[in-house]
Amino acid sequence: MRAELVMVGTELLLGEVLDTNSQWLASKLAEIGVHLYFKSTVGDNPDRLALVLTQALERSDAVIISGGLGPTDDDVTRRVVASVVNRPLVYSEEAERHVRQYFQHTERPMPERVLRQAWLPEGTTPIPNPRGTALGIWLETEGKLLVALPGVPSELKAMAEEYVLPRLVGREGARITHSRVLHFCGIGESSLEELVDDLIREQSNPTIAPYASLGEARLRLTAHAGSISEAQAKIEPLEREIRRRAGHLLYGADGCTLEQAVGDLLVAQDATLATVESCTGGLLAHRLTNVPGSSRYMLQGWVTYSNESKMTEVGVPRELIDRHGAVSAEVAEAMALGACRCAGSTYALSTTGIAGPGGGTDKKPVGLVYIALAGPDKSVEVVKCNFPGNRLDFKTRATTAALNLLRLRLLQK
Amino acid sequence: MRAELVMVGTELLLGEVLDTNSQWLASKLAEIGVHLYFKSTVGDNPDRLALVLTQALERSDAVIISGGLGPTDDDVTRRVVASVVNRPLVYSEEAERHVRQYFQHTERPMPERVLRQAWLPEGTTPIPNPRGTALGIWLETEGKLLVALPGVPSELKAMAEEYVLPRLVGREGARITHSRVLHFCGIGESSLEELVDDLIREQSNPTIAPYASLGEARLRLTAHAGSISEAQAKIEPLEREIRRRAGHLLYGADGCTLEQAVGDLLVAQDATLATVESCTGGLLAHRLTNVPGSSRYMLQGWVTYSNESKMTEVGVPRELIDRHGAVSAEVAEAMALGACRCAGSTYALSTTGIAGPGGGTDKKPVGLVYIALAGPDKSVEVVKCNFPGNRLDFKTRATTAALNLLRLRLLQK
């Protein structure tokens, strides 16, 4: 099957929005062996969209459109699709029901114009949208398949994963591409590449590609094969060898996040956690609680932004702050020990540092952070780091370092 | 001038690489008033690239290609361009000199194959590349302009900024495109469009385009003009009218975030804030502390994930939780009042709800959240919301609603 993507939206041609949908769709199509030969991007302009769609339907077996399905005047995809395949727009009761239910659920008044979204090209099988009002379009016409999904990434992904991709797998009997991503923390991209240099040079199927972002690194192992299980069998020995070399630097595979890996270890050890954050301002607790079921181990967190709150909430002695400053190894330790004691948790993580852009000095520059981990028997360890980047990069790197400190501690048990 | 982008690279169609070049080029072209009508992405395949280039030269005045200029076998751009414009490849001494100098400078041995990059279509003006070996192509043919740049982002950007964009400005009557983005909270995309429906219909320059994401909405006002100041003068009266209609629904413009708008109001009123979060798990504090200088008003936060911590940290009475459940208006109120009292802050925000995917019941489904705001004189208000989406969407929407509740309260002062 030869597929083609058509991304609709003037904002894409003005460069105001980075198109991440098409990369995501492309990688998913590659996984199931659907060959993507072209991708076109066009504005919210009916004539030019019609031109692109007509050509796409001529040269490809399947055309997947993203965007232009909303309720506003510049959402042109529904009527252009109808005109290109030469069918009328018909009113879908099913789509109307969906829109009304969506507004009932959110308990907001429904503007009449959202019902525009119930007009779909004749012959359309509406694609359910669990996250928004716009239903997608699944339309088979003259041996070609035309699919349209909303441009909102969370809606597009949910609809593609739950509806479109499974149905495309069924149509295709081809060679598939299967990837497995291994996640590492505590090693840079270059060192990781060195670790597997010989494997990269030896291999052509699977291939190995390294990536890095803000304190974490990844290897993507990609195999081409006749089936998923055949691809997995190609990847498995390679993964085993990489795991042998990487040891505890590797924390998980595929969709596993660092906070998920930490959570799994806490659950396995029946341990609980508290956090007390200064410079990371809640991001550490936010990441930990992004994991479904995290209430099993995450007891509570403090964001002790003021010095006062470091004292009142987790009992940091005033003289410690006076003598060493709030950004110091001593205060980080006292915060973690205090959090452990106050929350009655097995472990506690603390952060104190200078997120910037202001507030740095020669001795304590922007990017400096102390991270402490308190554990059973009042044990405590503290690490000092310096992170580059802007405020959000800093918070991300500092929380990653904190999570990894806990992960390594849990692995020693 | 009507321009078109052609992005070359099989890795783009496999979804292995996120294409950031085209967004960057698109925004730069918009700034100098070059209209981008189409963008096509195609793999390292000579036939399909030829097809796309032929069509692009037919329908556009300028075609800008990214990628496929390297020294390897799958770098096909040079020869496909030559064949499409029907000219031979000729060896460029200038290009050879550039490549040799590059390797001398980097003190690395030069593989012979890099000299392939010296073969350029006849009539090409080579575009200097300060960062790499591949020279770009600037070729005028039958009234059309064809430009090719390497796909490496740092090379592409340097060559576009130093060579291509200045020359495009010179060709064009130098009309620029300037946008201003207005941010709204507390109104959906459809209702926002209704609010400015007549303005959208009346206007062609500036244009008005609505967008939405996770509880916030935006209007982009875009003007074409001879200069930035002329464009601003066109946008100004329109913005004034929209602000008049939207009132407090509008919270800021351009790069302003909701948490920044809230922070500005807190600073202006010399007020302080505390947060106590259950279901949002620290995201509210994280967003507030993403604003540089937020330590001026953000005193502290609690993540009271367990019932126990709601009682010990901010004094929620146990019988309140027993009677109404932790997810209730009563507990949300008690959390906010307790946080205000314990932190000694002017205001406090609380959240308690069911982020899912588990934990929902018929009476208290996933997506339910109570948000409370406590203020001076022990005043407290509470709102109940139901949010669709996954765990992270839910947390984002709930924190947006909380921030907006505080913003509206501060505006009433």
Image (cartoon, coloured by chain):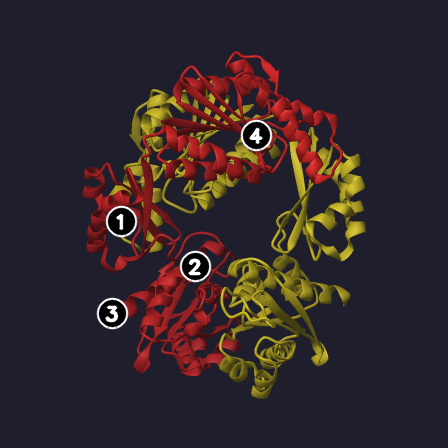
Chain colours: A yellow, B red
Tag 3 residue: B412
Pointer 1 and pointer 3 on the same chain: yes
In the picture, measured across the screen, residue B61 lies left or right of residue A184, that is left
Tag 2 residue: B365
Quarter holding the N terminus of chain A is top right
Tag 1 residue: B192
What's the distance in space between the residues labelled 1 and 3, CA to CA?
22 Å
Q: Helix or strand or loop: what does disc 2 sit on?
A: loop
Q: Work out whether mark 2 precedes mark 1 in sequence or the reverse, and give the earlier one.
A: 1
Amino acid marked by disc 1: Leu
Q: Helix or strand or loop: what does disc 1 sit on?
A: helix
In the picture, measured across the screen, residue B20 lies left or right of residue B69, that is left
Q: Which tag is nearer the camera, tag 4 or tag 2?
A: 4
Pointer 4 and pointer 1 on the same chain: yes
Q: Are marks 4 and 2 in contact (CB under 8 Å)?
A: no
Amino acid marked by disc 4: Gly
